[in-house]
Image: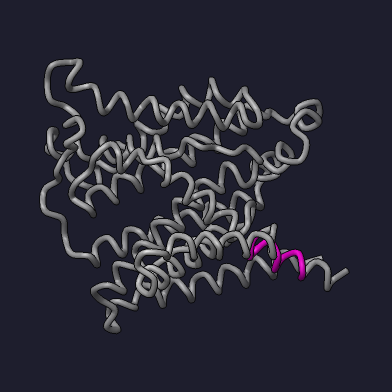
Amino acid sequence: MFRPHIRFRNFVFASLAVGIILVILPFLGLEGYRLRLLSLVFMWAALSGCWNMMCGYSGYIDFGPVAYFGVGSYCTAILMIKGGLPFFLSVFLAGWVCAALSLVVGFSTLRLQGAYFAIATFAAAEGLKQVVLEWDRVAGFEFFGGAHGLTFPPAPAEIYFYYIMLFFMAWTVALTALLERSKFGYGLRAIREAEQAAELSGVPTLKIKMRAYVLSSSLIGCIGGVEAYWLTYIIPDDVFNVLRTIQMVIMTLLGGMGTVLGPVIGACFLTLISEYLGAKFVYDYLILVGVVIVIVILLMPRGIMGTILQSKRGQKS
């Protein structure tokens, strides 16, 4: 009767212990390449977690989250460079801009289902990319920087972004854990299992999907702004690159869609495997990474975390 509460409490304690270890790692000598690599893992875990928050629990496959990553990057850049605002305020406002934009996009696209929704969100992302690329030429004055992009002021030390990315990863995991146990999360899962039946049962499906979409998009926009300042230079072809979306999807699939820790596991696995194979096989590592992804998905179609949870349920039954 109390086992779910015990499991959740154990999850909270374990998460706090891991969090404390990650916080103190830089004080124990973690620096340079390893510090940057861990920061990269945190960033992708947070991005995949945001995608999973919407798509993993609702079953809607979104191919357009890179739109909010790019908008968040450019909003942060413009507010800092042209508006003279501080970094954290710029990121915060960029998140609100992405939330407002996702309301407009979501209100139109979330009425679609299946491949139609996926294509519509992909088209929205590509459309925003073209707007940023062509705006300066069409408008006749420099604003987005066109294909040349924008350059930020000098960024702080690597450890600064290590803690920011760690915060976003922890925040995403915490939100997903709360979502999974909430009425809102049950509504999303009902949509994934049978949307029409859920709607007939009184579940406000469009409202729930909109809430998840806006929450996910605003967080992705904030992370985009942080990464932009981290790199100090952005161009449309990079921040609006569809490969970012594909990477979020693959990491979530590898870890396990619709699970709290799936995106974290998938991000750790894919990032570390890519780095290791990239160092050992400079020219052929992408082929090897693809082979590893295919093997993992074939052996564990529910993802790493999904397979673990399924085996535990099998043992209990």
Residue 200 image position (x, y, % from top left): 80, 26
Asked if 257 appears above or below 273 in the picture, the reply is above
Q: Is residue 300 magenta?
A: no
Please name whichever residue, 100 or 314, is drawn nearer the observer in this view of the structure.
314
Residue for point 45% across, 39% down = 65
The residue most toward the front is 283
- The single residue placed furthest to the top in the displayed view is 139
Q: Is residue 56 left or right of residue 239?
A: right
Residue closest to the far bottom: 28
- For image coordinates 48% across by 39% down, the residue present is 215
Residue 57, horizontal then vertical, whole percent: 64, 45
Instruction: Tell me where residue 187 appears, x and y as whole percent.
Output: 69, 39
Q: Which residues are magenta?
A: 303-311
Foreground of the two, 67 or 93: 67
**Residue at left 23%, top 21%?**
135
Q: Is residue 127 above or below residue 169?
A: above
Q: Is residue 7 left or right of residue 66?
A: right
Report the residue at 52% width, 35% height from top. Answer: 213
Q: Which quadrant holds residue 198?
A: top right
Q: Is residue 47 above or below residue 273?
A: above
Query: Which quarter of the picture shows residue 314?
Result: bottom right
Residue 15, percent from left and from top: 52, 70
> What's the magenta bit mostly, secondary-structure-wise?
helix
For the N terminus, the image quarter is bottom right
* 309 drawn magenta: yes
**Quick one: quadrant of the C terminus?**
bottom right
